[in-house]
Amino acid sequence: MRQERITATTVRAMKGRGKKVVMLTAYDTPTARLLDAAGVDIILVGDSLAMVALGYETTLPVTLEEMLHHTRAVARGAARALVVGDLPFLSYQVSREEAVRSAGRMLKEANAHAVKLEGGAEVAGTVVALVEAGIPVMGHIGLTPQAVHRMGGYRVQGRSAEAAARLLKDAVGLEQAGAFSLVLEGLPWQVAAAITEAIGIPTIGIGAGPRCDGQVLVTNDLLGLFEEFTPKFVKRYANLRETLLTAFGQFRDEVRGGVFPGPEHAFSLEAAEAEKWERLRQRARARKVTALRK
């Protein structure tokens, strides 16, 4: 029996029911199907795609077209989970009209159910415009990777009382603008806990401690598939890198050693056809020998 689709409204209501929100990232159909089958509530097609799948050093280079492409793939694999498409750098900052157009394409062309954007008070007006256009919005404050150069690197935010107060104000403003949920990244747990208590929409933490209304990780980090660096807040639930390296090495050795493919991996002619093929082959060989002797 097919389960009912999770919506932005479903997610928002989870806070009132005290049910933790579970979110993971995906960039392709097979991963989306696995996350869906595992009961993950939200599948985020994050702009982390740039670093963990496309080989960029930061999230900044990934384009809207690339995000649309991967979001389409994820949407095809998610029958139950809410699919959220990340709006990449400069797809929503230039103007509110541009933001509505970019977000609209996420829903219209990529079949996402909602979008995520980074920023606090400076994007509240954009959130209002998107919500008025019928587009559910997930906010994202704290350590915002698209602002990596302004922040001077991937640094924990809200370490001072003044900075924490600004983040709380941002969170309240995003809720008032109409966001249905809010990612809190790279915050002291006390600050994240205060924000979670102060607003009526779910907070989803990543490096923000246990007091948020839900948690998210980048799936490649969770599986041990991203080796460039490992943030403190990441917990590895598998080491697929070693598993894959072992499998690839075994394939290499078996091919070079003539072990693979074995008889069980090969197709065979039926006996009658094999006899007929052998006769044809012998005739062709005889004709070739005769031609060479002339």
Image: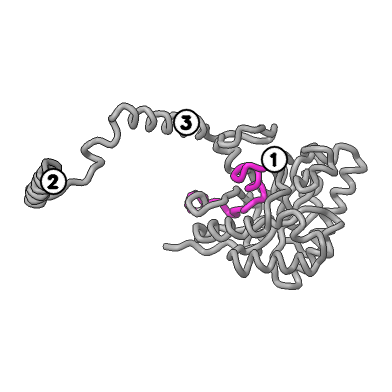
**Mark 1 and mark 2 residues within 8 Å of each other at the beta carbon:** no
The outermost residue toward the right is: 162
SS for dot 2 = helix
Mark 3 or mark 2, which is nearer the start of the sequence? Answer: 3
Pinpoint residue 67: horizontal percent, then vertical percent: 63, 56
Which tag is nearer the camera, tag 1 or tag 3?
A: 1
User: Can you tell which mark lies on residue 245?
Assistant: 3
Which tag is nearer the camera, tag 1 or tag 2?
A: 2
Residue type at mark 1?
Answer: Glu
SS for dot 1 = loop
Pinpoint residue 30: horizontal percent, then vertical percent: 48, 51
Residue beneath label 1, please?
57
- Cα distance between the residues tagged 2 and 3: 52 Å
Query: What segment carries the magenta color?
Result: 33-56
Pinpoint residue 130: horizontal percent, then vertical percent: 75, 67
- Cα distance between the residues tagged 1 and 2: 63 Å
Q: Is residue 54 magenta?
A: yes
**In the figure, 282 relative to 91: above or below?**
above
SS for dot 3 = helix
Q: Residue sitting at 89 percent across and 46 percent down? A: 165
Question: Is 143 placed left or right of 290 in the picture?
Answer: right
User: Can you tell which mark lies on residue 291?
Assistant: 2
The outermost residue toward the bottom is: 133
Viewer-proximal residue, 154 or 208? 154
**Quarter of image, res 226:** top right
Question: Is 255 placed left or right of 234 in the picture?
Answer: left
